Amino acid sequence: MSGSIDMRVNLAGLELRNPVTVASGTFASGREFADFVDLSRLGAIVTKGVSLGPWAGNASPRIAETASGMLNSIGLQNPGVEAFVVKDLAWLAENAATTPVIVNVSGHSVEEYAAVIERLEDESGVAGYEVNISCPNVDAGGMAFGSECAPAAAVTRACRAVTKRPMLVKLSPNVTDIVSIAQSVEAEGADGLSLVNTLLGMAIDAETRKPLLARVVGGLSGPAIKPVALRMVWQVSNAVAIPIIGMGGVMNATDAVEFMLAGATAVAVGTANFVDPTVTMRVVDGLVEYCHRHGVTDVRDLIGGLEA
């Protein structure tokens, strides 16, 4: 509750104190933001992607700023699930004990996705999973599993078989028909969806005639992709029964309201964390202010409230 306004939402079985969380890969596990953000005020924390073993990521340069947003080709760099448990999960249990932790899961194969979840099943600090089949920056895994219905369904089925915890699947916007892919993972037991990951793009230095990223292409994020993300959240929310975390250019509370009106149950702040590390707190406060200003006493009334 926030005064007279009920800010709680139920996301795929997870009770969140408010709808605001963070996009995987933009907040690490919260340690670097703890001096700026009261982690206990977030609805949930979504960790950076975790794979079974250490993942080196792509060669540098792998970040480029463009006039239309940020391009990244990090490539899911992480130290692997064992190091995650010892370092990050333990830290979260001590410093964000009351905030649900959703672990973003990555893999080179269907079996690896399931193995990461199996390893985490005995860890009490994990509230749920976000299965990432949408990263555009790796050659094996990631978007390769999320571009068509059959492989997306296969990963979801394998992960569902090893956990009863809430499980969301993160989808890519780099597809022709995101609705059919969303329906395929819903049919295999996904409890929720995360929409959307970055849009595949590239940038060129005209003077050197070389790409700005070592991998040439990368994922575009920031305000430029918000209209695409909003459209996909709206389309999918009208086609599935499971809840959605909406993301893609959420820079302020107004953006968050728009995603909820389009059908999102919660919203994830991503690239904005690099611009202002306190932005999540401003989004939480701004949502409360919006509800006060519009006479909304239950934030859930915003979900799917688009008047079209």
Image (tube, grey):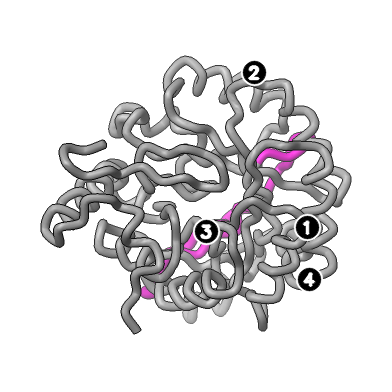
Q: Going from the N terminus, do you reach mark 1 or mark 4 first?
A: 4
Identify the residue at the far left of this view. 293
Q: Amino acid at mark 1?
A: Glu
Viewer-closest of 25 and 21: 21
Determine which quarter of the picture holds residue 254.
bottom left
Judging by the rendered image, the residue that carries numbered circle 1 is: 188
Residue that carries the numbered disc 2 in the rendered image: 86
Q: Residue at x 69, y 69 (%)?
A: 183
Q: Is residue 189 left or right of residue 35?
A: right
Name the residue located 30 percent from the left edge and 52 percent from the top edge.
299
User: Can you identify the residue that label 3 sits on?
Assistant: 244
Mark 1 residue element = loop
Vertical placement of residue 195 versus 210, above or below: above
Along the horizontal axis of the image, is 266 left or right of 76? left
Q: CA distance from mark 2 to mark 3?
A: 30 Å
Q: Using the numbered discs, state the Cα–Cα distance from disc 2 to disc 1 in whole angstroms.
A: 31 Å
Magenta-drawn segment: 50-75
| Label located before the other in sequence (1 or 3) | 1
Front tag of 2 and 3:
3
| Crowd class of label 2 (few under 14; some 14 to 19; many from 20; radius 10 Å) | few
- Give the structural element (helix, strand or loop) at label 3: strand
Residue 168 in the image, given as x and y percentages of width and height: 63, 50
Q: In front: mark 2 or mark 1?
A: 1
Mark 2–mark 4 distance (CA, rounded to whole Å) = 35 Å
Q: Closer to the N terminus: mark 2 or mark 3?
A: 2
Please tell me which residue is depicted at 49% across the width and 56% down the height of the picture.
Answer: 245
Give residue 149's mark: 4
Q: Position of residue 274 (x, y in %)?
A: 37, 49
Judge depth for marks 3 and 4 and give the one in front.
3
- N-terminal label among 2 and 4: 2
Q: Is residue 72 magenta?
A: yes
State whether residue 252 is above or below residue 285. below
